[in-house]
C-alpha cells in the first residue's frame, strides 16, 4: 500500500505522534481533532494546522474525505493507572465516534492505538466489542501489543495497535513488525544540563550492590528494560529509582509520587525526574520539536502521546502489504 499522497485524518491527535509518522511516509493530513487546548496549541505550533475541538460535536459529514483514519483514542478508561471503567466512562465511548466516522467515509485503513490493558479489559469483552463493530463495518482487524523498547526507544511502553484494512481492498494478511535488534539506554538521550529539580531527601535508599550485567569481554550488556536500584519513601508509584543504563518506565500523563509521570533516575549520582526534552526523545520526537507548554502540561502531553518509532515500524509493514489496486481507486 503506497502511502505517499494518501489523505489521513488525525483524531485525538494530542501533539502529533501519528502526524509525524504518517507524514514521514508522504501521507497528507486533511483533518485533525484534539480537545485539550494546550496540546492543540503545541500541535498548531509544530505543524501549522489548528486542530478542531471535541470530536463528539463534529458531524461526520463535515470531515473531509480521507484514505486513512488514525487515532490514539483516550486510554484513561482502560488504563491500569485509571479506574478501568471502559465503555462506562465517557472517554471509553469515544471509540464509537471513530466508528460513526468510518461508517460514513469508509476509509481504506483504520490505524488505532491504546493502552496494553485494552486487550484484557473486562475479560477481553471490550476488545471483542471493538472488533465486532469494525467487522460489521467491513474491516479486517489485526491487533498486537508492541513495546517501544523493542523499536529503538529507551522506554518500556507497551501499547496495543490495531491495523484494520477495508475488506474489499486487502489482498494478503497483514503482519506486524518484529522487534529490531538494537540496544539502547537512557544514557543515549540525556540532556547535559536538564532543567529539572534534583530530589534530595533523607529517605532515598539506593542499593549498594546492584548488578550491571557484562559480556565475556567485560562490556556492559544493555538490558533494554528498566533497572530499579532504589526507592524514595516506601517505594510506591512514582517513588522508585532506576539506573540510566536501562530504559525508562512508561511515561504517564497522571500518577503520584515525587517521580510522577516520568519516574526517578540516578544520574551523575543525583536523583531526578526526566526533563520534558528527554521525555520527547524517548517518544521519538526530534529535538526540533517545539515544547511550548508549561512543564506540567508538557509532561502530560508526552505521557499521552504515542511512540513514533513503533508507528513508523508498523507503517513500513503497511506500505509493503499488497492490496487490490483497482479497488483502491474506488
Image: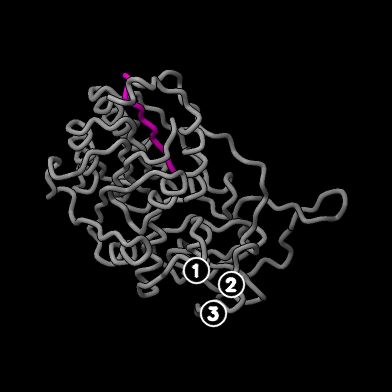
Task: Decide which of 25, 85 is in the foreground and name it.
Answer: 25
Q: Residue at x 62, y 41 (%)?
A: 180
Q: Is residue 134 left or right of residue 180?
A: left
Tag count in the figure? Answer: 3
Q: Quadrant of the C terminus?
A: top left
Q: Residue at x 52, y 61 (%)?
A: 281
Q: Quadrant of residue 42?
A: bottom left
**Tag 3, which secondary structure?**
strand
Q: Which residues are magenta?
A: 159-168
Q: Report x, y in % for residue 321.
A: 47, 27
Residue 125 appears in the picture as rendered: no
Q: Which residue is mark 3?
A: 198
Q: Is residue 121 left or right of residue 290?
A: left
Task: Give the mark, 3 or 2, whose residue is nearer the N terminus.
Answer: 2
Q: Mark 1, residues whose alpha carbon is within 10 Å: few (<14), some, or many (≥20)?
A: many
Q: Assign the magenta stretch its main secondary structure.
A: strand
Q: Report x, y in % for residue 226.
A: 60, 55
Q: Residue at x 54, y 34 (%)?
A: 177
Nearer the observer, disc 3 or disc 2?
Answer: 2
Residue 104 appears in the picture as rendered: yes
Q: Mark 3, residues whose alpha carbon is within 10 Å: few (<14), some, or many (≥20)?
A: few
Q: Residue at x 52, y 41 (%)?
A: 313
Disc 2 vs disc 1: Cβ atoms closer than 8 Å? yes
Nearer the observer, disc 3 or disc 1?
Answer: 1
Q: Which residue is mark 1?
A: 277
Q: How is the image coloured?
A: one colour
Q: Quadrant of the N terminus?
A: top left
Task: Decide which of 50, 192 is in the foreground and name it.
Answer: 50
Separation (CA) of disc 3 from disc 2: 14 Å
* Dot label at residue 191: 2
**Tag 1, which secondary structure?**
helix
**Tag 2, which secondary structure?**
loop
Amino acid at each position: 500500500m503506497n502511502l505517499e499522497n494518501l489523505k489521513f485524518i488525525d483524531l485525538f491527535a494530542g501533539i502529533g505522534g501519528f502526524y509525524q509518522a504518517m507524514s514521514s511516509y508522504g501521507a497528507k493530513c486533511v483533518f485533525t481533532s484534539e480537545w485539550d487546548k494546550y496540546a492543540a496549541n503545541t500541535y498548531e505550533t509544530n505543524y501549522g494546522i489548528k486542530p478542531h475541538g471535541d470530536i463528539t460535536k463534529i458531524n461526520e459529514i463535515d470531515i473531509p474525505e480521507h484514505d486513512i483514519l488514525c487515532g490514539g483514542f483516550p486510554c484513561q478508561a482502560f488504563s491500569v493507572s485509571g479506574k478501568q471503567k471502559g465503555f462506562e466512562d465517557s472517554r471509553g465511548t469515544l471509540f464509537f465516534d471513530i466508528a460513526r466516522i468510518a461508517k460514513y467515509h469508509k476509509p481504506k485503513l483504520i490505524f488505532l492505538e491504546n493502552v496494553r490493558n485494552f486487550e484484557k479489559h473486562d475479560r477481553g469483552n471490550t476488545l471483542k466489542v471493538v472488533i465486532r463493530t469494525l467487522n460489521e463495518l467491513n474491516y479486517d482487524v489485526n491487533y498486537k501489543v508492541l513495546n517501544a523498547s523493542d523499536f529503538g526507544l529507551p522506554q518500556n511502553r507497551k501499547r496495543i495497535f490495531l491495523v484494520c484494512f477495508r475488506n474489499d481492498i486487502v489482498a494478503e494478511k497483514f503482519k506486524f513488525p518484529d522487534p529490531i535488534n538494537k540496544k539502547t539506554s537512557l544514557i543515549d538521550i540525556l540532556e547535559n544540563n536538564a532543567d529539572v529539580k534534583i530530589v534530595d531527601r533523607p529517605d532515598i535508599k539506593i542499593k549498594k550492590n546492584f548488578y550491571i550485567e557484562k559480556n565475556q569481554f567485560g562490556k556492559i550488556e544493555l538490558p533494554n528494560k528498566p533497572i530499579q536500584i532504589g526507592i524514595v519513601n516506601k517505594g510506591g508509584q512514582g517513588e522508585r529509582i532506576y539506573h540510566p543504563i536501562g530504559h525508562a518506565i512508561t511515561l504517564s500523563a497522571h500518577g503520584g509520587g515525587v517521580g510522577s509521570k516520568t519516574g526517578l533516575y540516578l544520574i551523575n549520582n543525583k536523583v531526578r525526574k526526566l526533563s520534558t526534552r528527554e521525555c520527547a526523545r524517548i517518544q521519538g520526537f526530534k529535538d526540533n520539536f517545539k515544547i511550548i507548554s508549561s512543564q506540567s502540561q508538557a509532561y502530560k502531553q508526552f505521557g499521552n502521546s504515542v511512540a513514533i518509532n513503533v508507528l513508523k515500524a508498523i507503517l513500513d509493514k503497511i506500505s509493503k502489504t499488497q492490496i487490490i489496486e483497482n479497488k483502491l481507486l474506488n
